[in-house]
């Protein structure tokens, strides 16, 4: 049975909320890296896979178009906020090493943002995490709101045309324009999401290499 006395310490709560240098987490010679970061990584990867390939797909198949659009409009700000927060947590809780890493030939690295910004972590850590953050912030503050705005304009055009945007053609010139804009922006947003997921999976390989 696990020792639940750890719940009285800062350790479980540090994973998400506390800067890593405030909490001494024991390490060993064989496993010099603390175990704090994979929890945030698991949240990031799990939520991305679920929303991209399970939740969104099932909702699209089971809900009428209007209800599906309403659901996604409500979910996306929450989803991309979470996807933006997790890379920040990953950067702030970067698990440094108390000993050299013989596998990678590293010297000791500090924990937290100092380790994240270390020169030798530029491409293996800082680049993928920064790419995740950038892609999700673009979706949160620009691509997502822009897509919602196009959907709102398209809805008004449906009222004027007396015809749904996804009905069989022909469509008015205005509706054709909105459909093209929506397809372009939706594709851009989806591509950003997949790029962020690819960087997340790449960083998972980096983490796996460190604990091998």
Image (tube, grey):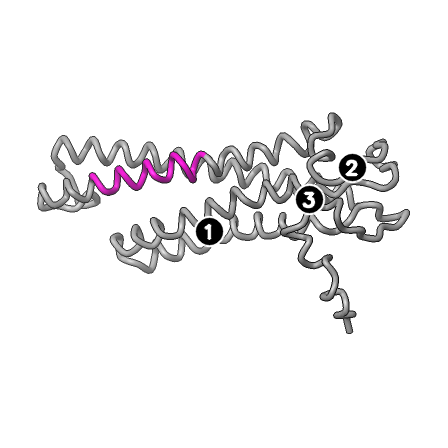
Secondary element at image label 3 = loop
User: Mark 3 — residue?
Assistant: 93
Specify the quadrant that holds the N terminus. bottom right
Give the mark nearer the N terminus: 3 vs 1: 1
User: Mark 1 — residue?
Assistant: 51
Relative to 82, does residue 104 appear above or below in the rendering?
A: above
The segment highlighted magenta reads 138-153
Residue at figure coordinates x 29%, y 36% from the top left = 182
Residue 187: image x %, image y %? 37, 35
Residue 87: image x %, image y %? 59, 41
Number of other residues with Cα within 10 Å of mark 2, as a class: few under 14, some 14 to 19, many 20 or more: some
Q: Are marks 2 and 3 in contact (CB under 8 Å)?
A: no
Residue at figure coordinates x 19%, y 44% from the top left = 155
Q: Are marks 1 and 2 in contact (CB under 8 Å)?
A: no
Give the mark nearer the N terminus: 2 vs 3: 3
Cα–Cα gap, marks 1 and 2: 34 Å
Cα–Cα gap, marks 2 and 3: 10 Å
Number of other residues with Cα within 10 Å of mark 1, as a class: few under 14, some 14 to 19, many 20 or more: some
Q: Label for residue 110?
A: 2
Side of 84 relative to 142 (left or right):
right
Relative to 65, does residue 146 appear above or below in the rendering?
A: above
Q: Is residue 134 magenta?
A: no
Secondary element at image label 2 = loop
Side of 41 relative to 197 (left or right):
right
In front: mark 1 or mark 2? 2
Q: Residue furthest top?
A: 119
Q: Label for residue 182?
A: none
Give the mark nearer the N terminus: 1 vs 2: 1
Side of 92 relative to 70 (left or right):
right
Secondary element at image label 1 = helix
Specify the quadrant that holds the C terminus. top right
């Amino acid at each position: 049975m696990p020792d639940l006395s750890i719940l009285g310490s800062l350790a479980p709560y540090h994973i998400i909320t506390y800067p890593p240098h405030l909490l001494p987490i024991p390490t060993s010679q064989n496993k010099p890296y603390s175990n704090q970061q994979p929890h945030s990584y698991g949240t990031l990867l799990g939520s991305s896979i679920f929303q991209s390939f399970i939740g969104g797909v099932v909702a699209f198949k089971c809900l009428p178009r209007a209800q599906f659009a309403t659901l996604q409009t409500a979910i996306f700000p929450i989803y991309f906020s979470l996807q933006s927060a997790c890379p920040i947590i990953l950067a702030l809780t970067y698990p440094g090493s108390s000993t050299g890493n013989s596998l990678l030939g590293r010297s000791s690295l500090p924990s937290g943002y100092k380790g994240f910004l270390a020169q030798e972590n530029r491409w293996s850590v800082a680049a993928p995490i920064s790419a995740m953050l950038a892609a999700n912030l673009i979706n949160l503050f620009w691509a997502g709101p822009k897509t919602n705005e196009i959907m709102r304009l398209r809805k008004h055009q449906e009222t004027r045309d007396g015809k749904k945007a996804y009905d069989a053609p022909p469509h008015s010139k205005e509706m054709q324009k909105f459909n093209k804009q929506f397809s372009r922006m939706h594709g851009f947003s989806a591509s950003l999401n997949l790029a962020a997921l690819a960087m997340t999976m790449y960083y998972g390989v980096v983490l796996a290499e460190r604990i091998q």
